[in-house]
Structure formats: C-alpha cells, structure tokens
Image (cartoon, grey):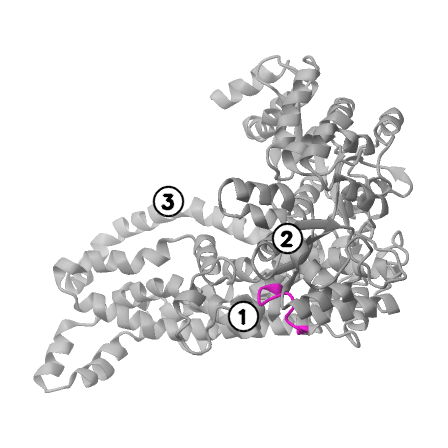
Amino acid sequence: MIVLTDVRNDRGASARAARTGRRARGLGAVAALAALSFSLGACAGDGGPPTLTWYINPDDGGQAALAEKCTAEAGGAYRIETSLLPNDAASQREQLARRLAAGDPSMDIMSLDPPYIPELAEPGFLAPVPPDVAERTTRGVVQGALDGATWNDRLVTVPFWANTQILWYRKSVAEAAGLDLGQPVTWDQLIQAAQTQDKELAVQGARAESMTVWVNALIASGGGEIIVNPDANARDIQLGLDSPAGVDAARIVSTIGREGLGGPGLPTMDENQSMSLFQSDRGSFMVNYNFVWPAMQGSVEDGSLDQAVVDDIGWALYPRVSPDRETAPPLGGINLGVGARSTHPDLAYRAIECMVSPENQAEYFVTNGNPPSALAAFDDPEVRQKFPMAPTIRDSLDIAVPRPQTPYYNEVSTGIQQTWTPPADVDPATTPRDSQEFITAVLRGERLL
Amino acid sequence: MSSQAATGKPAMSERARAEARLGWLLAGPAFVIMLLVTAYPILQAIYESLFRFRLTAPDERQFVGLANYAVILSDWVWWRDLLVTLLITVITVAVELVLGFALALVMHGAIKQLRGLLRTAILVPYGIITVVSAFAWFYAFDINSGFVNQWFAWVPGISPDLNWFAEFGTSIFVIIASEIWKTTPFISLLLLAGLAQVPGELTEAAKVDGATRWELFRKVTLPNMKAAIMVAVLFRALDAFRIFDNVFIMTNGANNTEVLSLLAYRTSIGRLEIGMGSAISVLLFLCVLLIAFLAIKVFKVDLAGSRGGN
C-alpha cells in the first residue's frame, strides 16, 4: 500500500513520473509496482528537482564528489545521483549494454570506457551531443581522447579523463644495466636489462582486457594496426595481426613469457599484481597506468612500503618496439555519454559540462589519480606538485594510440586474449596467423568464442 | 495398516477422493506456476536460438534456422568444454561418493550425543555460498595472496613459484578439489538417509549368522541402499554438470578449463549474442535431460524408492 501511495505522490513531480503514473492507472497495481523502480530513479522525494542518474565506474570517490559539486552548482535545476558499475571494463559494458538495449530510462549519464563506445553508438543507444556542448567540451582536449569519443566522424560522448600507460623504472636497476632512460628505450633493451640484472619485468600477462592493451600498443608501435578497416561490418573486417608488426609483437610477448622474465605470476598478472611485483626486490621495469603512483604513496603512508623504493622510481615514455619507430602508448580513460532513452538529455549534458570543466578534471586527477583529458588541467599547480610525472603523462597522451574503434571490439579483444595467453605459449611463427584466422571466423559467426 | 486399508476401502473412497481433490487444489497453482516459469524460458530460448541476433545490433536480427547449432556442434570449443565438464562431473561424483559414504558411516555410527554436532560440522561447507567458497579457494591458491604454496612447500611438486592457475592440470585440480569440498556433505546426507533405511532385522540376522563387517556392508547394507546411492549419484551428477562459479572465479575459462555453462554465459551475457547463446543453453539443457534419462532408464534409478516407501 505504501508503495502505491508513493507512486501517486510522485506523479506531479516530474514528467517521467507522470508517464509512469498513467501507465499505473492503465495497467493496474502490477504495473505500478514495476513503474516504481523507474520513479525511484527519477524523483527526489516530493516535488524536488529532477534526478539524473550517473552510472560510474569504481574510483576513490571522485565521481561521487563531482556529482555533489555539480548538484550544488546547478542551483536546483537537477540533482545527480551516482550508481556504481562493476569493477572491470568488460562487466561495465555488459551491464550498460543490457540496460540500454532494454530501454532503461534511468541511463542519464554514463562513464564509458572508450573502446566500447562504437558498440553503443552504432545502434543509437546514445543521445546525440548538442553542437554547442560538443564545441565547448572538446576545446583543448588531447587528440586520443577525442578519437575515442567519436564514432562515424561524429562526437557521440564527451571526454572526461584520459589515461595512458608509461614506463616506470627502478633507477638503481636501470643504472646498473647501463640504460639511459633519458633516451627512448626499446622492449629489447628492457628484456636485456632484466636478464643481465636477474630481475623481472612487470607486464600484464593475464587472459584479460589488459592483454589486448599490450598487444595493441606493440603492434601500433611496430607500424601496424589490429583492424585495418575498423568501421566495416562484421563480415568484412580485415585484421592486421598477421603482419610483420604482429610477428614483432609476438616475439616480444613470447620472449618475456618463455624466458620467465615476468616471474611465475605472469600468466595471471593484472595491473595491481604488476605493481606488487615492481615494488618487490625482483622489480625492474613496469608498464602501467598512473594509478600506481598514488597507490604506492598510500602504501608508504600506511607503512607497507619503504620510502626508499618510491625514491628509486623513475618514469619515461612507453617503450618502443624498434629503435627507428615511434612508441605508441596505450590510451584509456573514461568518456561521458547520455542514454538515448533518458528523459532529461538536455540537463544531463548540462551536468556533463560541469563535470568535465578543466578545474574539475584537475581536481579529479589530484584526488583520484586519473589524468585529465583537457590539456589545460595539466598546468594546475597542485597537479604539478602532486604528480611530478604529469609532463610525461601529457606527452604520452599526445602520442597515445587508442584500441581499435569498432562495434565488434569485444569479439576482437576476447579473441586476442584467448590466442595470446599465456605469454609463454605465444609463438611468433604461428600465433599472429592463428589469432587472425580465429577472430575472423568468430566475426563471421562461424566459430564460438 | 494394510489389512485395515483393504477392508475399509469402499468406506474410505469418498474421503480419499476428496483428499485427492484437495491435493490437486493445493498443489495445482504451484504446479501451473512452475510449468510457466520453467517452460516459458525454455521455449523462449529455443525460439531465440533460431536467430542470428546480437543485443547491441537489434536491427540486424536474422532468422538462420538451425545454423547456430551447426556452428556449435562443428566447433572443437564445444566438444572441449563438454569433455572438461564431463571430466569434472565424473571425478567429483566418484570421489564424493566414496568420501560421502565414509562420512555417512561416521555420522551413522556416532554416539547419540555427538551426532548433532557431527552433522553440523560436516554440513558447514555445504552451507557456504558457492561463489564465496570459490573466492576462498582462489585466494588460498593464488600465487600473490595464497598461503598454500608456503604451507605445503614440503610436498613434492609444490614450491613458492607454483602458479596454480597458469596451467590446465593444476587449475582443474583446484577447481575439482573445491567442488568436492563444497558438495560432499550433500551426498553424505543423502547416503545417511539411505543408511537409516537399512532394516535393523536384516543386519541383526546377518550378525547372528556370523557375517564379518565387510560382508555385512557388501551383502546387506549396500544392496538395501541401492536406491539411495543411485539418487545421490544422479542428483550430484546433474549438479556437477552445471558447474559454473568455481571456474568463473578461479580461471574464467583460461588454460582450457572452460565448462559448458561458462561458454553459455560468455556467449549470451558477455558477447550479447542472444541467438548463439540460446542455442548453447538449449544444448546444455538437452545434455542434462540425457543424463537424467540415462540414469533413470539404464541404471534404473528409482526416484520413488528413495523416499523410504517399501
């Protein structure tokens, strides 16, 4: 009974509640109960401003803080409520795609991992970005983040923060190996240094999305690309795995795997475990995102890590595949999108503009360790002070290469994960070709994945 | 009882009919609802399995007939996953049957004061949610967080460098061990119920005739428990065939440890390929039906016999 009364009370509060109310009258109590789940998301009690739901990926509370801040700045025009998505990017995609496909009207604002954006944009699950919002939110944004926000030459999401992997190294090990990190380094140099110093390389060898990130960076740095024609349909997609760049990438992955350079944990190693390995006595070089810096500072504060380890850490651009080719650091980050069925797309875009302002991006960087997509935010004095590697990150973002932008990214990525792991089983002579044939067959619907 | 029932039959018939009617009235709604909630998803899955349909490409839905089934059955991934599933089923059921019997005998033979405590202690693993137990086993064996390598370093083959989840053999060992740990109590409870059914007079008579304990077990206890054992094996086999949580948490199918339910999950939920995923689910359903059919027809499992009726 209480439930039904609530629905009636809410009816006058907003357009969406009115709609659910009508439905309730038409279909009776059962429908009213179902509608309650919508109205709970839509209404802030009796007669309050419309509530926007922001589906956020897990962080250190930065997005929730931004939601509060922008709610306050809205002056009663709207309220933002956050709703937490699962931990890993693949599970986030699953939940968002299911909700969007089902037409869930609560999908007002979504934190989206860039490689999954084409899949959601292609069937029209995302509300179009108003031209004026697009104009204001893309000024001074790093190119990689813009590429990730675009599909079919149209901006479909707004860049919020950009992420990139850089090379972290132990100064003592690099020095002992005679490696000058002031110059660009190659993977072969790192492999050799780890071998001669009897240390381990911290890379991500688990059968997970991180494997695609690594393979993509290696192939891009070798002058190739995983997908030659990313906007083709599933049957016509041509892959570039079986290429000289693919063979080079396989050589590097398999050498690290076969020589035991990633340690015994390599086949199950993710970003966090890489960080643990890098901090240990076996640590030498690590490719990883920037979250490791605040995490290690935190470990020093709670006494689980020696300050000397942090003092020994240096950073440089992501390693190259060959000395005569530019590096291609992985690009990540989060963009903000609006669901096509959202009842308040205009308000949602207003809220997004507030969230992605350079000041807020700088603040988010300082509090949560996720780098901004707006270049201006890198000039923030607090950013400079707290993240001495900020200039390296900025440089890295400038040259970072996104993962393939295609509606079939999930298939391509899972296919790579299945054929390029464990690293010790990768064979330059067969893996690139097998991988390419396998993924092509899956895309044509001829194989299971 | 039986003679009374025989003589009173004509007089009872009106009442018996009324009871039967009441029975149907009471159970009918539940029966109809059960039919709806089980039949509807199955029919829906069969229908969906005839399409090439991806959730994020609603406009490209295309009727393909049985093509999804042809792809699945001609792909080694399906057969590999089927073999892995059968391997896990056969090993866990066999080991659990032996362990469960031992535990049932212990519980059966324990003195009265200890029985309650013993049953509770044995039941604890079964009371733990499967995902929770899977995580517990995963963290115990994981090379970064685990203690197994340190504690059991004295065992040949186990060293601090052993990454249990990096290879098929060690991964499947942990998966099977955790499954056995988790569900042996279930089978031992079913067997305990069977043990309690063995008529005391038969055991007494065999003892008087001078049977040894082994003979008593083999010639009196086992034959009288056949129904209970077969039911336990059937239930556990069906349960083990649907294994999901352990594999999902520990390896997520890496190192060829993927099982059929994980394949169905990854296709439907992960890839959002509703058509292909439904076809896998339908085939999985048929496998379960086949196991139940084989058990009941070939091994003559008497489901009614296990209820204690003679």
User: Which amino acid does the dot numbered 3 rest on?
Assistant: Leu
**What residue did someone put label 2 on?**
A271
- What secondary structure characterizes most of the magenta part? loop
Q: Is residue B205 above or below residue B227?
A: below
Image spot of residue B269 (x, y percent): 65, 52
Q: Secondary structure at mark 2?
A: helix
What is the quadrant of residue A209 in the picture?
A: bottom right
Q: Residue at x 63, y 74 (%)?
A: B79
Disc on the earlier residue, 3 or 1: 3
Mark 1 and 2 residues: CB-CB less than 8 Å, in contact? no
Q: Residue at x 72, y 71 (%)?
A: A254
Residue B112 horizontal side relative to residue A87, left or right: left
Give the magenta part as a residue range: A258-266
Q: Residue at x 53, y 57 (%)?
A: B249
Question: Could one spot residue A351 in this view of the protein?
Answer: yes
Locate the C terminus of chain A and report the quarter of the image it occupies: bottom right
Task: Determine the CA span between mark 1 and mark 2.
Answer: 31 Å
**Circle count:** 3
Q: Secondary structure at mark 1?
A: helix
**What residue did someone put label 3 on?**
B26
Mark 3 and 2 residues: CB-CB less than 8 Å, in contact? no
Q: Is residue A307 above or below residue A237?
A: above
